Image (tube, grey):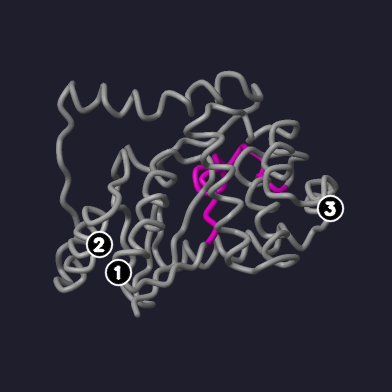
Amino acid sequence: MATVDFYFDVMCPWAYQTSKWIRSIRSERDVDVTWRFFSLEEFNRGEEKKHPWERPWSFGWSLLRIAAYLRRQGEGNDAVGEFYAVAGRMLHEEGRAVHTRDGVDAVIAELGEDPATVEEALGDESTNDEVRADHARAVELGVFGVPSLVVDDGDVLFGPVVAPAPVGPAAGRLWDVVTAWTEFPHLYEMQRSKSPVQQAHIATVFEPFAIARATGSAAASPRVRSRG
């Protein structure tokens, strides 16, 4: 069985699409996925800015704290995956501002969790510690953005960056491509240019996220990727 540590920030639309792919391949290939936290807010933070844990509410960071709390209280890794699936769908497909303090209550309600979960997670300083630990480990490994995969405790791969996510047999074939990459230790990067048609397609896929961001908090927010 292959193992994958999947580093994500709920706020990143690219990571969400890749998370849909990684879920899909589990019915096509023998893959065990562990969900790991990475904060774009912290990674992209300017020196003059506060750390996300120094604010009462930070878009992506606070969502990760809630996921960390559920991981501890519930079904471990599965609880993180379920939270990410629901929060990601609401944010990136339905255009709902779950990255706001009021909006995240809808995620908790759909999961059937205690309505007090959010306040308990934010009132527990150890949830900051748990998110910081995952993030620090990611940076130590060389992760610089999301989605990032650590395959079989070895190769650290940024991507695949794909929208929309392939499903079924196509998802399995993409997995084969990704794992084949690891056979070449000195192959570092390959990119495809985006035509105007492809750029328009991406804009359509990400439109719900843009709507959610526009209707959410006016506070400073992270970039969705850490490199242009």
Classify residue 177 as left or right of residue 36. left
Q: Residue at x 74, y 45 (%)?
A: 54
Q: Position of residue 132 (x, y in %)?
A: 63, 60
Q: Earlier in the sequence, mark 2 or mark 1?
A: 1
Q: Which residues are magenta?
A: 36-53
Q: In the rendered view, would you say 163 is above or below 213?
A: below
In the structure shown, which secondary structural element does the residue marked by tag 1 occupy? Answer: loop
Tag 1: amino acid = Arg
Q: Residue at x 23, y 68 (%)?
A: 179
Of badges 2 and 3, the one in the foreground is 2
| Cα–Cα gap, marks 2 and 3 | 38 Å
Q: Residue at x 42, y 52 (%)?
A: 19
Q: Nearer the viewer, residue 35 or 46?
A: 35
Q: Earlier in the sequence, mark 1 or mark 3?
A: 1
Q: Which residue is mark 3?
A: 120
Q: Position of residue 176 (x, y in %)?
A: 20, 65
Classify residue 208 as left or right of residue 158. right
Q: Which residue is mark 2?
A: 175
In the structure shown, which secondary structural element does the residue marked by tag 2 occupy? Answer: helix
| Cα–Cα gap, marks 1 and 3 | 37 Å
Q: Which residue is mark 1?
A: 29
Q: Earlier in the sequence, mark 2 or mark 3?
A: 3
**102 magenta-colored:** no
Tag 3: amino acid = Glu
Q: Nearer the viewer, residue 121 or 111?
A: 111
Q: Residue at x 63, y 47 (%)?
A: 61
